[in-house]
Amino acid sequence: MDNPIFRTRNTERSRELRRASPPAERTLWSQLRSGQLNGHRFTKQFQVGSYFVDFVCREKKLVVEVDGWSHDARQGYDGQRDKFIRSKGYELLRFTNEQVTLNLEGVLVMIRERLAAIPSPNPSRTREGS
């Protein structure tokens, strides 16, 4: 059955979430925005179904989540959410606020490695050949 919640984007909610970003998310965003990570473009607070993800590289279908202290209390919810997001073809990487704050370069290395390992969705279309 086609559910309208999966067709309609809630841009106002995305804006609210972007404005309320915790410091660790803002720090990571400063490194992901504007194609700064090997030219890969990320979107912040992107809606997948009825869920909002912290960051997504839509080209590679990679979701990056930054978990705060509340994640420990919501593991059941997050498990369901992750399962749904994966069912839509996305891969997920999760980092804690502490990882981002204390080891930003290590987090960026892991994201770069995962992006490099994901095949391009249109292998016949390369940037050099375009």
Image: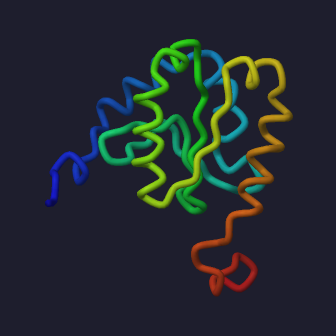
Q: Nearer the viewer, residue 106 or 9?
A: 106
- Residue 56: x, y in percent? 55, 47
In the picture shown, does residue 84 fall above or below 16?
below
Question: Does residue 98 appear to the left or right of 7 in the view shown?
Answer: right
Q: From this view, report whether residue 44 is shown above or below residue 71.
A: below
Q: Position of residue 34 (x, y in %)?
A: 64, 46
Q: Nearer the viewer, residue 120 or 130?
A: 120
Q: Position of residue 53 (x, y in %)?
A: 47, 38
Q: Image check: 120 left or right of 77?
A: right
Q: Quadrant of the N terminus?
A: bottom left
Residue 108 vs residue 117, the one in the foreground: 117
Q: How is the image coloured?
A: rainbow
In this picture, residue 37 sits left or right of residue 1: right
| Corner quadrant of residue 31 | top right
**Lateral position of residue 122 relative to residue 109, left or right:** left
Q: How many marks?
A: 0
Q: Position of residue 54 (x, y in %)?
A: 52, 35
Compared with 19, 125 (above or below) is: below
